[in-house]
Image (cartoon, grey):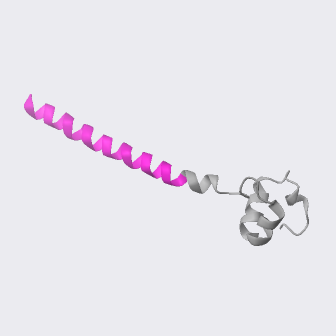
Amino acid sequence: MVLINNMIKYIYNKIRIIGYIFIIIAVLRVPLALAAGPPPGADQTVWCEQNADECSEWCAENSEEDICQEPDCD
């Protein structure tokens, strides 16, 4: 019985560690996902001029935005 209890504790500890790893990875990825696009309150035109690559990627997902309708935002 002691052997089974030790195995259960060992497995539980490994599952808990894996869970923590998943949580850490998820938390580290969130700021990258939220950072896409111009910062709130910033001028979109200026941001697109300074960050051309990010602007084109952002406009691919947000084609309805006014700045993305301009021909030079490709």
Does 37 appear above or below 23? below
Q: Residue furthest left?
A: 2
Picture residue at 59% right of the left edge, 57% below the top: 32
Residue 31, image x and y in percent? 57, 54
How many numbered marks does the figure carry?
0
Assign the magenta stretch its main secondary structure. Answer: helix
Residue 63, image x and y in percent? 83, 54
Quarter of the image with the C terminus in it: bottom right
- In the image, residue 59 lies in the stretch drawn in magenta: no
Q: Is residue 14 left or right of residue 35?
A: left
Bounds of the magenta segment: 1-29
Q: Is residue 25 left or right of residue 36?
A: left
Residue 2, image x and y in percent? 8, 31
Name the one closer to the observer, 66 or 71.
66
Residue 62, image x and y in percent? 79, 53
Picture residue at 37% right of the left edge, 45% below the top: 20
